[in-house]
Amino acid sequence: MCRNKIQNIRISNVGRKAGKKPVIERIPFQCIVPPHMLKEIAKRGDPKQRELALKHLMISERIRGRREAFGEFYVATSSGAKCLNVFDAKNGQELPGVQVQDPANSTDEAVKEAFGGADATYDMYHDVFERTSIDDKGMCINSTVHYEEKYDNAFWDGRQMVYGDGDGKLFNRFTISIDVIGHELTHGVTEHEAGLAYSDQSGALNESMSDVFGSLVKQRALNQTAAGADWLIGEGLLTSNVNGKALRSMKEPGTAYDDPVLGKDPQPAHMRDYQKLSLSEDNGGVHINSGIPNRAFCITAMEIGGYSWEKAGKIWYITLRDRLRSRSNFQDAANKTYQVAGVMYGSGSKEQLAVKKGWSTVGITVKTK
């Protein structure tokens, strides 16, 4: 049985808070649209687009600054059963907003999508990885839609999901892409496990983990194999006015968009192109350099074949759960995924060799000893 297999290969207790209830977490602030993209809009867009981009950057900084200043902490409440709630901010900033009754059958597309995406994410983590909600203790997954006016972002704030409606010119509503929902909710999983620090390579790994599992939510919902998946993050989020197909491409980092307003996708696909940035620039490039581990996972999954969540996804999940620490870097991730693949499938197995190829393709040689 899959459940026994996952339980039996627990490698360590790193990242878990076993026996300690409730889990207490410092609240982060992680958005799907990276600041470098909003800054490009603020420079290149028309007057209204520039105004909105600057406004949304200020909203993000205000929320982040308030939490850092007051050192907020959050105690998650557990429900014991699947618990999914959707709220409506009614274009304001008060969270969580007004609770929506029967969101699964709502006539409001954003409400229905937010519920469906949270449901699909919960089910993947529960059915494939035997995880009970974001914290593995049954916390309610709360989502707020219609945040602010024409808000060009979605974020996980350590308590809940928040979605803007988009400006309609560059971005559609942010519930439209199920992988965006899976991405943001996975930030919560990472908080409760490895707690990857949100800067430099550990932060890029944090972002990559969210892309990996967000993509798996989408692939599972669409019943796609690794070979059949598009490996795009945020496909459908950009409007037809934009020369682009998504926010990021895991298969071909750097090719997702090339637009007069948004600029060109800056993600590298190989370590030789790694961008060493200051912490003031996207926390050291967490949304940019994540293209490197993203491609490593994509290559691994395609080498293994079949459904990505069945083997490659489990290798990455167990590594996140048991092996990575807050300051783990790309080399650590390469070494640990290789080791976990060996424990799960055997030394020299097809799966372990696929992991090795995935990392070598992006310029990282796993250390096998």
Image (cartoon, helix red, strand yellow):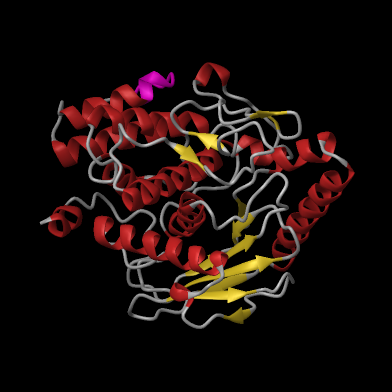
Which residue is at the front of the view, 340 or 213? 213
135 falls in the magenta region: no
Outermost top residue: 272
Q: Residue at x 33, y 80 (%)?
A: 80
Q: Residue furthest left?
A: 1
Foreground residue among 259 and 330:
259
- Which quadrant, please, contains the C terminus? top left
Assess whether residue 360 is covered by the magenta stretch.
yes
* 332 relative to 183, above or below: above
**Where is residue 209 shown, x and y percent of the image?**
44, 45
- Residue 159 visible to an observer of this rendering: no
- In magenta, the rendered stretch is 359-366
Q: Is residue 50 visible?
A: yes
Relative to 159, does residue 205 appear above or below in the rendering?
above
In percent of width and height, residue 50 lies at 84, 44
Q: Is residue 27 left or right of residue 357?
A: right
In this rendering, position of residue 277 left or right of residue 351: right
Circle count:
0
Q: Nearer the viewer, residue 306 or 109?
A: 109
